[in-house]
Image: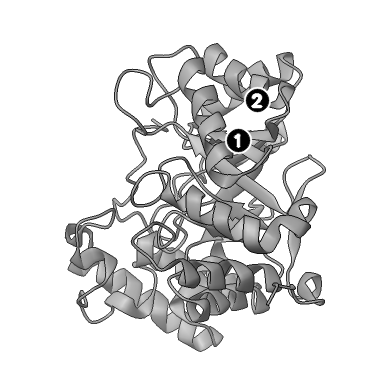
Amino acid sequence: MAYAPSDDRYERMQYRRSGRSGLQLPMVSLGLWQNFGHDRPIDSSRAMVRRAFDLGVTHFDLANNYGPPYGSAEENFGRIFRDDLRPYRDELVISTKAGYDMWPGPYGEWGSRKYLLASLDQSLGRMGLDYVDIFYSHRFDPDTPLEETMGALASAVQQGKALYVGISSYSAEKTREAAAILSELGVRLLIHQPSYSMLNRWIEPELLEALEDVGAGCIVFSPLAQGMLTDKYLDGIPEGSRASRDGSLSPKLITEVAMEKIRALNDIASRRGQTLAQMALAWTLRDPRVTSTLVGASSVEQLEANIASLQELDFTAEELAEVDRFATDADINLWAASSA
C-alpha cells in the first residue's frame, strides 16, 4: 500500500526560522548518523522516517560517511525517498555533508574543492536526488584555504546541486570568516551544526553570538551526549548499549563524576514531568538562536518520545539555575579539534 502522510502533520510540530534566512526548520530534526546503515533492517529505518514525517519532521540530516558502511545511510534513505517520499519532495529539507574520510587517497576527505564537489555528486547519486537542500562542510580543514572550501560550497549552489550551505564544528572565528567569504560570493551561510548538550556547552561563550551576528541558524547534534543524557546509563552500562561496543561513545566517558551529574539532572526532569532525554532536548532549545535539535532514534517509540519533548519547553529561572549546577563540561566533545 502506498504511503500517505498524516493530514495533521504540520499541526504536530513547531518550526523556527534559520537565522535571518527564509527557511524554517522543525524544532526537532531527524539525524541518520546511527541506525540507518546496512546493519539495520530497512523496514525499521523506513518506519522511523515515515513516523517522523507524520509528526511534522520535515528535515532529514545525513552525511556521506553515515552508515555503516560508509554511504549506506544515504543509500537507504534514497530507497525510502523513492518508495515513499518522492511525491512530497518540496515539503522536505534534506541535508548532507562532506569532510570526514570517505574513500582512500588524498582526495577522499577534508575540504578541498575536488573532494567536496565529488562527494556531493556521489551523495546525490546514492539518494536519487537532483539537489540537496543543505550541503555542509562537515569539519574545518586547517590545510586548505578557507576560500577554497567556501568556494566549493558556493559552486554547489551556483550549479543547482544545493539550495543552501552550512558548516559544522567550526570555531566562532572561522564561522565569521566563512560567512564573510560566502557573502562575497553571493551565497548566505544558512546554518552551523555544532555538538551541544548539557555536558558539552562549548557553543555558549562565542559561537551563538557569532551566528546571530552573521544571521545564520544553529542546529545542534548529539544533544543527548550520545545517549548519556538518557535513563540508559543511570545504573551502569547495559549490554548492547552504544557504550558497550566499539564506536563513538567510549565506556571511559561513563565516569562516576559524570553519572552523579546525570542522576541529579534526571531528578530535575522527573519533577518537570519529563524523562531526562526529553528535558535535555528541551533545554537545547531554550535559546531562540538554536533553530533545531537533531535526534537519532533506534525505534519509532524512541522517536515519538523525543519529539514529545516539545510539549514542555518552558523552564523557570529556578529550574535553569538548578540545571546549571550539574550541566557542566564532561570532556565528551569528540569534535573539539575541528572547532579549536
| Residue 12 falls left or right of residue 316 | right
Please report contact status of discs 2 and 1: CB closer than 8 Å, yes or no.
yes
**The N terminus - image quarter:** bottom right
Q: Position of residue 78 (x, y in %)?
A: 57, 52
Q: Secondary structure at mark 2?
A: helix
Precedes in sequence: disc 2 or disc 1? 1
What residue is at 65 percent from the left and 39 percent from the top?
Answer: 134
* Residue bearing the label numbered 2: 156
Q: Position of residue 248 (x, y in %)?
A: 29, 53
What residue is at 33 percent from the left and 48 percent from the top?
Answer: 69
* Residue bearing the label numbered 1: 135
| Residue 161 falls left or right of residue 225 | right
Q: Secondary structure at mark 1?
A: strand
In this view, 8 is above or below 130: below
The 10 Å Cα crowd at callout 1, few under 14, some 14 to 19, many 20 or more, is many
In this view, 197 is above or below 50: above
Say what amino acid the circle numbered 1 marks. Phe
